[in-house]
Image (tube, coloured by chain):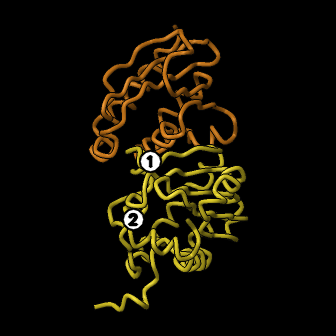
Chain colours: A orange, B yellow
Amino acid sequence: MSSDELENTIKNFVDKYNKNIKLQNMLKNWSSKVLIWIRNINKGFVVRIEKGKVVEITKSENFNEGNVKIVGDESILIDMFKGIKNPSSLYLNGVIEVYGPERDQIILDKIVEEIWG
Amino acid sequence: MKNKMKQIVYGSQEFLDRLKDAVNKDTIFRDLAKEDYNANELIIVKDLGIGLWQRTINGEIKDFMLIPKKKITEYEKQAEIVYYIDSYNSLVDICREGASFIQMIIDGQIDVKGDMKKLKRIQAASERMELIMKKICKDSLILSKEEYIRLLLQKNYL
């Protein structure tokens, strides 16, 4: 899998997220499985959240995993998780796709807003 | 002690009219909403069966009105975004300092259905509107659920 950089970028992002006290308080009732899917290689990562905390990141080759899915090309996803590219703009411009319950999508927006401003 | 008779009742049509005027006059809201805020939104208060309809065009609220129970289905079909609030008590909670619409979505008191791209476009302006609403709430009379139901019955919303 040629996505070591993405994996490290996700881990750095998750580290920031798990250490963010405001987000932890806000999301203490949220549990979910987020699939980050790399469109150009059809593989991805599953991020499992329990009571607001990310407890596991695993590699995945199954697009059906996760109750919310973020789909994009690898370089775009790396830039997004590094805070270089704005996820809302990417989504509104059709560069990434997001599927799943509205609540989860709103929560993901809030996380990004809180971490990257 | 404030005179209850002169206060606007939170959740009444008068309250919505005041909020609409205040939001439309707010330059920060208008700047955030300009071009991006074009939406038909409906808040449904599930335990009462009534709704609050908001039609916004180019960042200006054109309609903001209470929808009677018997017309909810008709407006639900027209809405691009629907917010289902579980109860009148949760609607009152939005007025509280420290409470937020987004937190209530996270905690499951509010369920959202509809056009997510539209929702993202209007999010910043919606948060500004929430702030304005909280200010108006401070000067408003918040009825108990029983009192609010009586008011809705008097005005034929139920």
Q: Amino acid at mark 1?
A: Ile
Q: Quadrant of residue A43?
A: top right
Residue found at x 55% / y 15%: A64
> Which residue matches tag 2?
B92
Q: Quadrant of residue B96?
A: bottom left
Position of residue B143 measured from the top left corner of the image (x, y, whole percent): 38, 73
Mark closer to the chain start, 2 or 1: 2
Measured along the vertical axis of the image, is residue B31 above or below residue A17?
below
Measured along the vertical axis of the image, is residue B144 above or below residue B50?
below
- Front residue of B13/B151: it is B151
Task: Using a 10 Å C-alpha cutoff, classify the residue at mark 1 as few (fewer than 14 neighbours), some (14 to 19) or many (20 or more).
Answer: many
The dot on residue A63 is: none
Position of residue B147 measured from the top left corner of the image (x, y, whole percent): 40, 73
Measured along the vertical axis of the image, is residue B135 above or below residue B70?
below
Q: Amino acid at mark 2?
A: Val
Residue found at x 62% / y 23%: A73
Position of residue B144 measured from the top left corner of the image (x, y, whole percent): 35, 70
Position of residue A70 measured from the top left corner of the image (x, y, whole percent): 55, 28
| In the displayed structure image, the side of residue B138 where residue A70 appears, left or right | right
> Which residue matches tag 1?
B105
| In the displayed structure image, the side of residue A107 where residue A40 appears, left or right | right
Q: Are marks 2 and 1 on the same chain?
A: yes
The reply to whether callout 2 and callout 1 are in contact (CB within 8 Å) is no
- Front residue of A52/B111: it is B111
Measured along the vertical axis of the image, is residue A41 above or below residue B44?
above
| In the displayed structure image, the side of residue A47 where residue A94 appears, left or right | right
- Front residue of B111/B59: it is B111
